[in-house]
Amino acid sequence: MRWTGIFMVLALAAAPAKAQDCGGSFNGFLAGLAQQAVSMGHSRSTVDRFLQTARLDPSVIKADRAQGVFQLDFVTFSRRVISQNRMDNGLRNAQKWDAVFDRIERDYGVSRGVLLAFWALETDYGAVQGNFNTLNALITLAHDCRRPDLFRPQIFAALTLYERGDFDPATTTGAWAGEIGMVQMLPGDILKNGTDGDGDGHVRLKTSAPDALMSGARLLHDLGWRAGEPWLQEVILPADLDWSKTGLNHKQSVADWARAGVKPRAGSLGAGGLPASILLPMGRKGPAFIAYPNFDVYFEWNQSFVYVTTAAYFATRLSGAPVFDAGNPEPGLSGAEMKALQQKLVARGHDVGGVDGILGEKTREAVQSEQVRLGLPADAWPTRALLERL
């Protein structure tokens, strides 16, 4: 379905606004977008040119509904995506763009390892940036009524970028969810934090590594990144640790964790006064990390627990940390079992963020609560034994 130009905009200008928020007739939806854009101060002729090639893209919806990779556990996912090739390329890029990373660390306080990890995981250092038409992706996801509040504003941000000469609705491509460039930023984030790192007068996140890296660093800084502080560190835990105090929803000072017997696997712990959480991605028998305040900023970039933990861990590897000790975690649940567990948790009054078969942070918190109630080690790792007890 394609937009047919300004005449259709004018013909549908009187369509009820409520029907244009999401769903319904695509032409009516586009007319609603056009009306809103004009009311925001954009010229109608510009809006018409911007929307004239817009269409729904069914492959975007298919990609949105098929994010099975996030059903993988942390060890499996991290081993899959953190290859030796990505490690080697990360170190080469750190040298190649050393001056840019020096500027980033001076201006924004973000470690080069952090940005290198995002760069690698998002686009393989710019090699795989996505071939979805960005405007069509945003319009498709805004028309779809699952998350219109997230994607509709991004269309108007893209329109502003178009007016500045930094977005082509017909040729700009990226990820299925509308992110653009080497570190995959949404148009709204580009508007707010896009930085001309190479001094050419434009923000080109697809072709300029300095632009992409500086913009990513500025975004992290804007989200609350604390300069010079750690984000994640592998630790060794005592066998008698109170597991109910672990998890991102529980924090105490680094000094308190040290007194409880928490030790760094390499190097030294962060400053004693920093608030921190003990993170057990696969329970008390798997790898263990201490998560500092900067780790919370990762969730402003991406909401997937497994992705965030992997990105943060990868950043420590690129900064010199050793490979984690995988331990011997208890077997996790299959996707079907996880959904069954989530249904049981919901029935007991817990908010798990949706019965989707994915072990996200809300499901972990609910699992830990039930483990405490049942007198089990409360490490937030769901097992078949817990499923049977529920």
Image: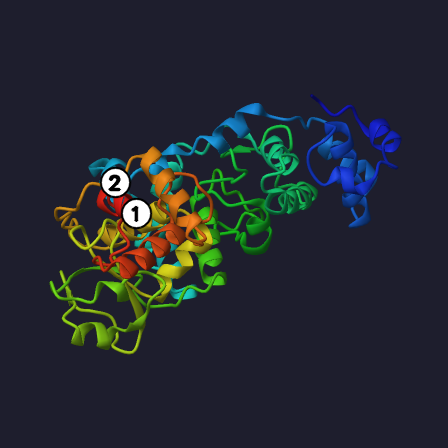
Residue 62 against residue 273 in the figure, above or below? above
User: Which tag, 1 or 2, sits closer to the chain's start?
Assistant: 2
Say what amino acid the circle numbered 2 marks: Ile
Residue tagged 2:
82
Please state which amino acid type lies under the numbered disc 1.
Thr
Q: Name the residue nearer the viewer: 24 or 194.
A: 24
Taking the image as shown, residue 173 lies to the left or right of residue 101, namely right
State the residue at coordinates (31%, 44%). Answer: 93
User: Considering only vertical position in the picture, is 35 above or below 137?
Assistant: below
Give the secondary structure at mark 1.
helix
- Look at 42% across and 59% down and name the residue there: 297
Q: Is residue 302 visible?
A: no
Question: Which residue is at a point 50% across and 45% down the rendered structure image?
Answer: 185
**Secondary structure state at the residue bearing disc 2:** loop
Q: Residue furthest top?
A: 1
How packed mark 1 is, by other alpha carbons closer than 10 Å (few <14, some 14-19, many 20 or more), is many
**What quarter of the picture does the N terminus occupy?**
top right
- Tell whether label 2 touches label 1 (CB within 8 Å): yes
Place residue 11 in its image quadrant. Answer: top right
Q: Position of residue 367 (x, y in %)?
A: 32, 53
| Residue 351, placed above or below residue 74 | below
Determine the image quadrant of residue 231.
bottom left
- Categorize mark 2 by other alpha carbons within 10 Å: few (<14), some (14-19), many (20+): some
The residue under the point 54% across, 29% down is: 61
Indicate the position of residue 190 as horizontal and vertical percent values.
56, 49
Q: Is residue 326 above or below residue 178?
A: below
328 or 209, nearer to the observer: 328
Residue 357 visible at all = yes
Q: Nearer the viewer, mark 1 or mark 2?
A: 1
Disc 1: which residue: 310
